Image: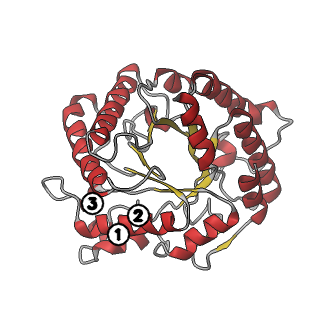
Amino acid sequence: MKNEELRFVARMGNGVNLGNSLDATNLWTYKPAAKELDYETFWGNPPIEKKHFQAIYQAGFQTVRIPVTWEDHLNSNGDISEVWMDRVQAVVDMALEEGLFVIIDTHHESWLDLQVKNETQIAEKLTKVWQQIAIRFKDYDERLLFEGMNEPRLRDSDVEWTAGTTEMRELVNRLNSVFIETVRSIEGNEKRYLLIGAYATSSFSEALESLTVLGEHLIVSVHMYSPYQFCQNDEGTDEWSELNVEDTKEIDEAFTQLNEKFIKKGIPVILTEFGCTNKQNLEARVDWVQYYAQSAKNYGIAYIWWDNGSDFALLDRDTGQWEQPEIVRILVEE
């Protein structure tokens, strides 16, 4: 079975995210009279169209991750708005029709704030949301995957972007189990591939070491933006070199641990988010991407570029054309 799971992820190949679209939040806080579907464009991206998935497939990508935030679309009983669910389904259908594998998740959910005292309420909401998603998509084949939680963490705390505490890491494992059991209980989802991650979906050693993966048809989801000063910090550096051990150390250590803890045991891994912001440093970005892609290939780890339509963008969503084809070429060829 484990070899089958590794082969499945190999078939999925590499991909891109369509971030900052269906995962946008808080529109009604600022524009109470807005229509519900205006959420999709609230963060500056145009509506998702067929041409986006055509471009992704034609470029050579095989997977698209579609981040989705649900919380602004829940009523007081936790029921998902039909308008929103229908739109998510329409977008999923567009992607599948183009021959892509599709991952959907629960993305910017403020209720997924890992305050241990609120575990019961968090688990109940997680259950209710995933029951509805699993029911809506129960007749879809294995090309549609579910990712339980995006970066579950204790928000606005000193440990938010660390490996968390022992207590929080254990809570993530329990919530992963809630997600798995909920989806598996819905007919048609017994063998669907599900993605779970560690605290904050982190690649930090302590977080990964604590992650429990029990069961079949499971994939470990990891986010890696390393090194931070190059990849994410606008005030950081725009230079990177594979000859500089300080630039490669964190990347090498993470891949080595992912291989030892998961891949060697037959548990597949996908970098569901990775990328580096555009600091007008194409040469350095190309070198960085080449190193990442080759490292991932060496271990049989798939990767999905974080495209948010702005500072991480590869796809011009207005035109459907690719920016920085040098980076796209590496991502699809490795």
Which residue is labeled 2 in the image? 22
Q: Nearer the viewer, mark 1 or mark 2?
A: 1
- The mark that comes first in sequence, 2 or 3, is 2
Q: Nearer the viewer, mark 3 or mark 1?
A: 1
- Whether 320 is drawn above or below 289: the answer is below
Q: Number of numbered discs present? A: 3
Q: At which x and y percent is residue 331? A: 71, 53
Q: At which x and y percent is residue 196? A: 44, 36
Residue 56 marker: none
| Type of amino acid at the residue the image marks with label 2 | Leu
| Type of amino acid at the residue the image marks with label 3 | Asp
- Left or right for 16, reference 147: right
What's the distance in space between the residues labelled 3 and 1, CA to CA? 14 Å
- Whether 292 is drawn above or below 285: the answer is above
- The mark that comes first in sequence, 3 or 1, is 3
Please give the name of the residue rendered at 78% of the width and 42% of the height, measured from the top-left corner: 291
Q: Residue reaching furthest right?
A: 243
Secondary structure of the residue carrying tag 2 is loop
| Colour scheme employed for the rendering of this structure | secondary structure
- Left or right for 282, reference 320: right
Which residue is labeled 3 in the image? 72
Which residue is labeled 1 in the image? 87
State whether residue 224 appears in this view.
no
State whether residue 15 appears in this view.
yes
Check if mark 3's residue and mark 1's residue have beta carbons within 8 Å: no
Secondary structure of the residue carrying tag 1 is helix
Q: How crowded is mark 3: few (under 14 residues within 10 Å), some or many (20 or more)?
A: many
